[in-house]
Amino acid sequence: MKVLQFREAIAEAMSEEMRRDEAVYLLGEEVAEYNGAYKASKGMLDEFGAKRVIDTPIAELGFSGIAVGSAMNGARPIVEFMTFNFSLVGIDQIINNAAKMRQMSGGQFNIPIVFRGPTGSAGQLGATHSQSFENWYANTPGLKVIVPSNPYDAKGLLKAAIRDDDPVIFMESEQMYGDKGEVPEGEYVLPIGVADIKREGTDVTVVSFGKIIKEAYAAAEELEKEGISIEIIDLRTIRPMDHESIFNSVKKTNRLVILEEAWPFASVSSEITYQVQENVFDYLDAPIQRITTADTPAPFSPVLLEEWMPNKQDVINAVKKVMYK
């Protein structure tokens, strides 16, 4: 095993797939000459050249449409958004063309395309640059949605996404690009749609994904000192979702807390809550608890931002609530 930063794992996944398949190429703002806004494509222009690592204008609708058209003609584009907040400018191409083309063409066109970039808050970036849209995209039939939380998962899942014949939304985090983790030396690909139990426990199931899962890890360490055992499930893939892993864990612990970095209304946690009460209601010994951001636009003030964002103490409080402590 070797240790890579999250950004290095992303770059390695893209580079390996571009070496493996000449149809794969990368385009987006600052991906080439600048090595990526977050250096997630460092060195790729030098290796693959300007025809396969392409700097675009600040025109998300335009270059998303170009990528969809090229996918219809046999290419396998990777589209980098500087942030998924900017994907809203190109969302018509993602929702109405990439996601629907296979069905609308009667299966004549596959759209093997990956839209990737950072999601969620990255500190004091303000209300328009601190949003999580994984539930928006997961609401769309035809799209797969992946939100990894560490370098190992990021590399293995991105390679799977690039090889997939359907459009994939691959969401990262500015605040994770410097995170380090072990990654295998050799080739590996992780299956899309399979959750991972990051920590086994017996008392409460905590389901999360993306960078906010770190708050669950921190809470579990604190709760362990009090004799409370937490099982942490990292969804990794939002759509298709691995419901069975969640159900099996709830059958064991009989309690569920869901942690996500998104607004509460119609969120991923709302869907999980419905699926659990529909399928394993009789195993629950307490009402399900959800932890989300506050139901407001993200504030700029660091004091307010700290209140807005879920944290370790929120997880601890929710765990104790479902345990009636």
Image (tube, grey):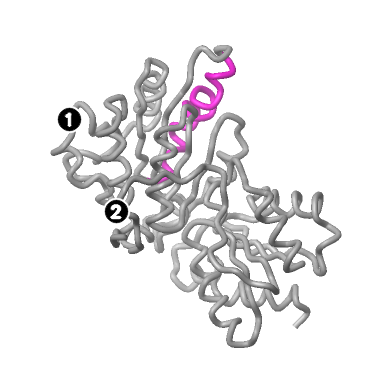
Task: Place residue 255 in its image quadrant.
Answer: bottom right
Magenta run includes residue 8: no
Whether pointer 2 and pointer 1 mark residues with C-beta atoms closer than 8 Å, the reply is no
Residue 294 position in % (x across, y down): 60, 62
Q: Which residue appears farthest toward the left when viewing the image?
A: 46
Compute the Cα span from label 2 to label 1. Answer: 28 Å
Magenta run includes residue 102: yes
Identify the residue position indicated by label 2 in the image.
Answer: 185
Q: Closer to the camera, 15 or 98?
A: 15
Residue 156 position in % (x across, y down): 41, 47
Magenta highlight: main SS: helix
Q: Quadrant of the C terminus?
A: bottom right
Above or below, 201 against 32 in this view is below
Residue at 57%, 76% in the rendered image: 220
Q: Which residues are magenta?
A: 83-104
Left or right: residue 42 versus residue 183 is left
Identify the residue position indicated by label 1 in the image.
Answer: 50
